[in-house]
Amino acid sequence: MQRRIRTRILITAILALFLLSGYGQITMPRFFSDHMVLKSDTTTAFWGWAQRGQPVFVKASWMEDTIKTVALGTAKWKIDLPTAKAGGPYKISVICRNDTLVLNDVLLGEVWICSGQSNMQRSAAHKLPQMLDVLHGPFNNKVRILNVRDIASETPQDNIYDMWQTCDSVSLRPFSAIAYFFAQKVSQTLDVPVGVINASWGGTCAEVWLPAGEVLTDSFLSAKSRLQKLAPFKPHLPGQAWNSMIYPFVGYGITGALWYQGENNTVSWDGYARLFSKLINSWHRKWKKDFPFYFAQIAPYNYKNKGLQRGALVREAQNQVSLSVENAAMVLTSDLVNNINDIHPILKKEVAIRMADLALVNVYHAISKNPYSPILKSYTIEKNRIIISFHYMDHEKLEVHNGDIIHGLYIAGKDRKFLPASYKIDGNKLIVFNPSIQHPVSVRYAFSDTTLTNLYSSNGLPVSLFRLDNWNQPTK
């Protein structure tokens, strides 16, 4: 594994030296390519390398003026490129002495970066029925995709191997279903170009997706990271995917990020809220922008845990992050599972639509609806009943779908023995009780690895799992 990582670093270094030698006066990261999408109505960073000390001229076809800069002693040049309203296609020419680099079919619109592990990475190549249907067309030319190959690195990299593509049956086959369906929904709703960058890697832990120092300088998180084991075909050390799959894009104008990961951190569930919060905040700091960060709560799955339900504990940690981190929001998957023995639920379009609705409400103000799933807010105990309130329910009511029984609803007294609970719904409040328990102290809902939820808000979104205790014991 380490040998493969070092080899790829060496290849990247040799490639950069080749491009900066006499074979060309100017080069750029490969994600500045034909068919790319740049963030519209803003000023975005635009950079590359050229002969040291030489002037570099950038001309974009949506601008009247040409921008001039100079390559520094490191050979790097960089400009702040003003963009126009969403549209295109446009052309960008970059000139240094006798060398001209031309980027064609450039669109201005919205750009989102999508990351995580296999549930973000799943595609038509994994025989997802929803994506296989997409391959028949027609294809939206306003949606552009960039699929970043899985390469790890011990040090931050300046470049990648991959370029932007238009959508067709070939380019979409290996591409993230969630990223594609998100882009399609946003593009169709706003009628603007949308570019999505998929930089995800199946089986990875969160530690590999943020700068290594964020983990290694935190003794608690550093100890938790050592629970991740060396395994074939994936990185496991802090920073290794960040360095090569995210860091090269730092500064590229993005609207926001989508994330689906957490399954591989069930081994270190008690550090996940802290780790994931650091991940989001570190991305914000690196981009110098508190962009929206929307993530999927991991789905019910039979981890075959005995005792502690670590999948549920990770979902609980994700609840905490969604409520505490600036500009972070969560969508649920707990009602979108067809097989609890498959860690890869096949309904990816529904997850993407829920993420798109968050963006369409919060970022673009394009639709009017409540895009949030209810999360535990507070509770009161009145005699033998516990009355529970939720975030994001001010104008909604609770509903039970698929019968009259709420799946996974339990209540316990001081003896910590959970019994199935009865309930009443009072608008947006849940009243829980059991005639056998006269002095209840805790309620749990869907607090297991495998419970499929059926308690909903009237906005059509499921209520997230919760517990009113901190007991390290299974519900039953």
Image (cartoon, rainbow, N blue to C red):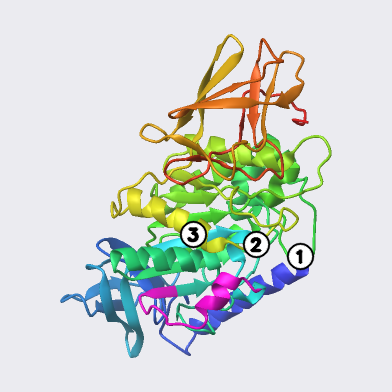
- Measured in 3D between alpha carbons, the distance from the residue under mark 3 to the one under mark 2, in whole angstroms, is 15 Å
> Where's residue 129, x and y in %?
60, 72
Q: Which mark is drawn over residue 162?
A: none
Identify residue type, mark 3: Ala
- Assign the N terminus to one quadrant of the image: bottom right
> Where's residue 386, x and y in %?
57, 18
- Residue designated by label 2: 118
Near mark 2 (Cα within 10 A), the count class, few <14, some 14-19 or many ≥20, is many
Q: Is residue 155 visible?
A: no
Residue found at the far right of this picture = 306
The numbered mark, 3 or 1, whose residue comes first in the sequence reads 1
Residue 143 part of the magenta segment = yes
Identify residue type, mark 1: Gln
The secondary element bearing badge 1 is classed as helix
The secondary element bearing badge 3 is classed as helix
> Where's residue 130, x and y in %?
55, 70
> Which residues make up the magenta segment?
127-144
Identify residue type, mark 2: Ser
Image position of 268 (left or right of 192)? right
Near mark 1 (Cα within 10 A), the count class, few <14, some 14-19 or many ≥20, is few
- Residue designated by label 3: 352
The secondary element bearing badge 2 is classed as helix
Q: Is residue 62 visible?
A: yes
Near mark 3 (Cα within 10 A), the count class, few <14, some 14-19 or many ≥20, is many
User: Which tag is nearer the camera, tag 3 or tag 1?
Assistant: 3
